[in-house]
Image: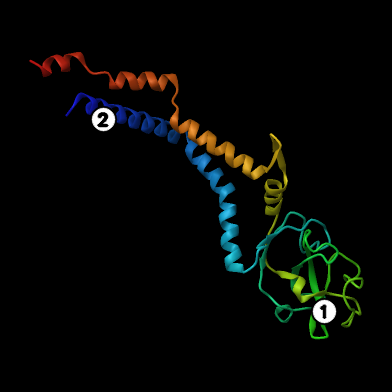
């Protein structure tokens, strides 16, 4: 083996040893586990949302109430799991225990969806309309400026095409965390990034820094470990 190849092999081995030593130190301190846990919590939400979109058949598998109109059933900050691809026929409408539905705001269809209970439904010219009401509201929603009235309440519900889905599960308070991550924005050099993306970037940088750098004490200890024993070298050539 040539001197150059031997040198390269020793150099690679040395780097591997330093990296392993650094990783072992971090593992002992629990740093790597903590960082990976945080990254999983932050990044995993993207993966989870993608999977839930497929499973629940909706582009909005999660939602969080932004008002108290559904209290005490739903509270601000609850995380709602939404089943998509539902039609008016799939919705059970009743003032006491009807399905809680998520639908586009007729006043602003591209804005934040509304979460209310389905209390009635009716047909006009072959189109289904769903009448909704917040559990904490005194009267049903009435969209008479946009759609025809009907049903036993004689108010205008929203059309079936505005229906996003129905709530199938509620996780209390988790929505606060998700909203804070996705709605809080930080401006860096003119670019706005969400708090989630900012934390992910910081954690990834921290992970690489701690994995591929070592303290002066570690470097000195590693140098002592790799330094050949003079007595062994002398005996080798006797």
Q: Secondary structure at mark 2?
A: helix
Q: How is the image coloured?
A: rainbow
Q: Estimate the x, y position of residue 195 in percent, counting from the top left.
A: 67, 42
Foreground residue, 166 or 188?
188
- The residue drawn where x is 43% and y is 34% is 28
Q: Which quarter of the figure has residue 11?
A: top left
Q: Quadrant of the C terminus?
A: top left
Crowd class of label 2 (few under 14; some 14 to 19; many from 20; radius 10 Å)? few
Crowd class of label 1 (few under 14; some 14 to 19; many from 20; radius 10 Å)? many
- The residue drawn where x is 38% and y is 31% is 19
The numbered disc on residue 120 is 1
Q: Earlier in the sequence, mark 2 or mark 1?
A: 2
The numbered disc on residue 14 is none
- The residue drawn where x is 36% and y is 20% is 221
**Disc 2 and disc 1 in contact, CB within 8 angstroms:** no
Residue labelled with disc 2? 9
Residue 42 in the figure: left or right of residue 126: left
Q: Estimate the x, y position of residue 162 in percent, counting from the top left.
A: 77, 71
- The residue drawn where x is 89% and y is 83% is 152
Q: Residue 11, relative to residue 59: is it above or below?
A: above
What is the distance, in whole Å, between disc 2 and disc 1 at their CAs?
76 Å
Q: Residue 12, relative to residue 94: is it above or below?
A: above
Q: Estimate the x, y position of residue 172 in percent, counting from the top left.
A: 69, 57
Residue 94 in the figure: left or right of residue 5: right
Foreground residue, 206 or 117?
206
């Amino acid at each position: 083996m040539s001197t150059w190849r031997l040198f390269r092999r020793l150099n690679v081995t040395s780097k591997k040893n330093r990296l392993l030593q650094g990783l072992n130190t971090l593992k002992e301190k629990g740093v790597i586990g903590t960082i990976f846990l945080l990254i999983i919590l932050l990044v995993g939400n993207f993966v989870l949302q993608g999977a839930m979109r497929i499973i629940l058949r909706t582009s909005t598998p999660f939602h969080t109430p932004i008002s108290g109109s559904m209290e005490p059933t739903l509270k601000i900050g609850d995380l709602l799991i939404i089943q998509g691809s539902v039609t008016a026929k799939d919705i059970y409408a009743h003032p006491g225990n009807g399905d809680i539905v998520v639908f586009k705001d007729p006043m602003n269809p591209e804005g934040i969806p509304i979460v209310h209970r389905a209390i009635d439904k009716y047909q006009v010219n072959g189109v289904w309309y769903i009448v909704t009401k917040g559990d904490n509201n005194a009267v049903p929603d009435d969209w008479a400026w946009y759609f025809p009235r009907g049903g036993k309440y004689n108010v205008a519900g929203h059309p079936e095409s505005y229906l996003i889905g129905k709530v199938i599960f509620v996780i209390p308070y988790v929505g606060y965390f998700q909203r804070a991550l996705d709605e809080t924005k930080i401006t860096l050099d003119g670019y706005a990034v969400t708090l989630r993306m900012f934390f992910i970037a910081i954690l990834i940088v921290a992970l690489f820094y701690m994995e591929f750098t070592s303290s002066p004490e570690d470097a000195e200890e590693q140098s002592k470990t790799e330094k050949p024993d003079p007595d062994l070298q002398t005996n080798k050539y006797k």
